[in-house]
Image: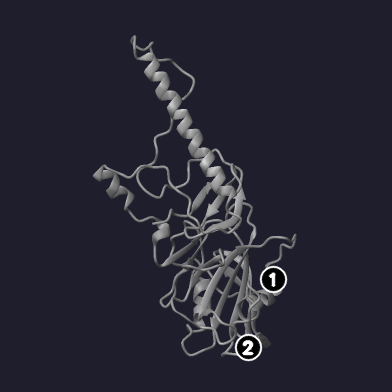
Amino acid sequence: MTPPPGWYPDPTAPPTERWWDGAAWTEHRRQPQNTPAAPQAFGPPVEPPLPAAGPQRPPAAPGRGAKTIALAAAGIVLVASIATGAVLLGRGDDDPKSRTAPTSSAPAPTDPTATASSAEPTPTEDASTAVDQLNGITLPVLDGWQKAENVVDDDMLITTPRTYDCPGDSGLCRHGTVVSRTVTGTDETSPEVIAKRDIKDAADASYDKNGINQQPFGGIESHQQIAARQTAVAGRAGYLVRWKVKTAKGPGGYVQSVVFPSSAGSEALVTVRITVDAGQDAPPLSDMDRIVKGIRAAGDSGSDGGVGSSIGPTVTP
């Protein structure tokens, strides 16, 4: 069982913290915050240490002082050994995207009451909802889809459950994917401008060359823009662009880029990319609209609210 998503000590660059998404390390890092510790994988929270300052205990009885000092020294040596081992292990990991889970220092629970409470489901365990904690949104997991498992892209939140042999270069492909990421590397603040820029990158990433320079579909031969419109996402004004792509091998597919401001933090722009194959075994194209309509700000449990409603013209295929 791996720990839930959260900030943990970065095994490659202590003492910074790194975001664990529940399955793999992401590229998001930060300096240690004065906030409560990240969720533990097992057992009750570890009791905080006693403060160094404050009233002192009375002197130990004769004959016990040496034993107390020895125990304290042994504890210091043990803590130092653990810290040194963690640093050496972190430095030995040359892969910045190591999928090694952060370990928990909490002991296994022995109290039946503690065990029962730790087994209670959390919001991230809801099979019908995928949570993007960094961008402060949740996305619906529709029938025929699942939360992403064993994927290379850390930003991929939802996929279709089954894989198939890619028609181009060797490998396994999926009939549908959903990726959510923060827009970076630009001062542009217009969702429309970003969406129109991003759609080509989204199409290339899904149907042209992948991250290891392979072409699972033999490359993109042509594309047709079938939608470009303003749309409300999680109660915010966004913009949507959708392409239909023709590939050298296989049936091709549909790629959609939706850009909107996050409701959390600095309200940075968020891009949600959705791909659906055009083949017979792929999800219906209408799932693209249903996913966008179901995007909500984290913590918003309302069943309606105008989320995803169109506020502009649509180009139909």
- Is the residue 304 above or below the residue 174 in the image? above
Residue 199's quadrant in the figure?
Answer: bottom right
Mark 1 element type:
helix
Image position of 235 with respect to 289: above or below: above
Rendering coords of residue 14 (x, y %): 59, 43
Left or right: 148, with 220 as reference point: left
Residue that mark 1 sits on: 192
51 or 69, which is in the foreground? Answer: 69
Q: Which residue is at 61% across, 47% downward?
A: 13
Q: Position of residue 271 (x, y in %)?
A: 62, 67
Tag 2 and tag 1, C-beta contact below 8 Å: no
Q: Tell me which label, 2 or 1, sits earlier in the chain.
A: 1
The amino acid marked with disc number 1 is Glu
Residue drawn at x 60%, y 77% is 206
- Seen as rendered, the residue at the extreme left is 112
State the quadrant of the C terminus.
Answer: bottom right
Q: Quadrant of residue 33?
A: top right
Q: Which mark is residue 247?
A: 2
Mark nearer the viewer, 2 or 1: 2
The local crowd at label 2, few if under 14, some if 14 to 19, many if 20 or more residues have their Cα within 10 Å, is many
Where in the figure is residue 11, as x and y percent of width and height? 55, 48
> Is residue 56 in view?
yes
Q: Quadrant of the N terminus?
A: bottom left
Q: Amino acid at mark 2?
A: Thr
Left/right of residue 104 with respect to residue 256 in the rendered view:
left
Question: Would you identify the image quadrant in which residue 26 lies?
Answer: bottom right
The residue nearer to you, when weighing 137 against 19, is 19
Residue depicted at 43% across the width and 33% down the height: 48
Q: Would you call the spot at circle 1 few (<14 residues within 10 Å), some (14-19), or many (20 or more)?
A: many
Q: Is residue 185 above or below residue 293?
A: above
Asked if residue 50 can be seen in this view, the reply is: no
